[in-house]
């Protein structure tokens, strides 16, 4: 029986790869005071321009239960098995909605095979897990193998980033273990990471330049010990900063490093100007 992969819009996977591996996307939304947009229906440039003009920070919302149900049913009714990989359940209700939709599907299709994985992260840390699953499907692995390979990838991945300000994380309630920084934000540049599904403090330094170098140093330390799978540079409306960051990493590893923009939902919670690095290793971190 064919296996199909479903993820959410915060994975920010390159469009060509989504098409190549037939990855289905269920979209979260961003909500301004008088407007709501599905993340997949608004261009990043348009969103960040609107964000800059608004006095208040927008909110985000998980995919509606009906949409989650419909995308699952469309695959199950075509006699497919389904593997869903979603952003951290501590950051969104997307995972729990998927579990609820699954239980509803099983009432109608009791023999349906639906596996749901909590990636414990978002952006390309989620994206790499999704691509790992999709490649395993492409190689005709069993669904049990796909699950095991994906969960193994999650254990071997890391996401570090530097926000331009903590205000977006604070107002969005996503600041997690970095909350202790709020009183000293003007004196430091925090480096954040995702641990156990939540935003946590990795380190704090004095300048953005030093923050980038600290992330690079940790990246080199990890891949020296454990080997490199893949790496990507993230940015939130800061293409020039991402290009410079990528060049530094490229000099260290001797090959091209791709850049992936972060879209409206995560951009809403982290804020413009952020830079990050996501990678996974060949052996467990």
Image (cartoon, rainbow, N blue to C red):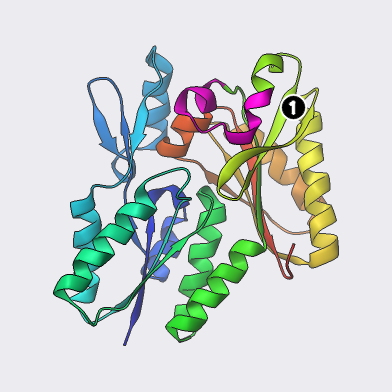
On the rendered structure, is 15 left or right of 158? left
Predominant secondary structure in magenta? helix
Q: Residue at x 25, y 60 (%)?
A: 101
Compared across the picture, whether 266 is left or right of 254 comes to left
The residue that appears at 79% across and 45% down in the rendered structure is: 216
**SS at mark 1?**
helix
Q: Quadrant of residue 105?
A: bottom left
Query: Residue visible at 56% across and 75% down?
Result: 149
Q: Is residue 118 visible from the viewing direction of this image?
A: yes
* Residue 138 visible to an observer of this rendering: no
The image quadrant that residue 228 belongs to is bottom right
Residue 60: x and y in percent read 35, 34
- Expressed as whole percent of the image width and height from the top left, the position of residue 191 reads 71, 34
Residue of label 1: 208
Residue 82 in percent (x, y) is at 34, 73
Magenta region: 167-180
Percent x, y of residue 43: 36, 37
Figure check: 85 above or below 233:
below
Query: Quadrant location of the C terminus?
Result: bottom right
Is residue 134 rendered to the left or right of residue 203? left
């Amino acid at each position: 029986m064919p296996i199909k992969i479903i993820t959410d819009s915060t994975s920010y996977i390159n469009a060509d790869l989504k098409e190549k591996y037939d990855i289905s996307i269920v979209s979260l939304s961003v909500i301004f005071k008088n407007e709501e947009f599905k993340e997949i229906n608004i261009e990043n440039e348009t969103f960040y321009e609107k964000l800059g003009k608004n006095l208040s920070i927008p909110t985000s919302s998980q995919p509606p239960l009906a949409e989650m149900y419909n995308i699952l049913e469309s695959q199950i009714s075509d006699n497919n098995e389904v593997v869903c990989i979603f952003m951290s359940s501590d950051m969104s209700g997307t995972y729990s909605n998927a579990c609820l939709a699954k239980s509803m599907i099983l009432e109608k299709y009791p023999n349906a095979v639906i596996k749901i994985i909590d990636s414990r992260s978002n952006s390309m840390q989620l994206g790499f897990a999704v691509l790992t699953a999709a490649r395993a499907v492409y190689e005709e692995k069993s669904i049990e193998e796909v699950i095991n390979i994906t969960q193994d990838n999650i254990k071997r991945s890391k996401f570090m980033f530097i926000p331009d300000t903590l205000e977006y994380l604070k107002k969005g309630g996503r600041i997690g273990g970095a909350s202790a920084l709020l009183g000293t934000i003007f004196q430091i540049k925090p480096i954040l990471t995702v641990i156990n599904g939540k935003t946590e403090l990795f380190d704090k330094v004095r300048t953005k330049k030093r923050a980038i170098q600290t992330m690079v140093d940790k990246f080199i330390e990890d891949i020296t010990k454990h080997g490199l799978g893949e790496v990507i540079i993230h940015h939130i409306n800061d293409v020039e900063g991402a290009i410079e960051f990528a060049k530094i990493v490229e000099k260290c590893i001797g090959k091209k490093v791709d850049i992936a923009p972060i879209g409206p939902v995560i951009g809403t919670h982290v804020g413009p100007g952020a830079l990050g690095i996501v990678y996974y290793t060949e052996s467990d971190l």
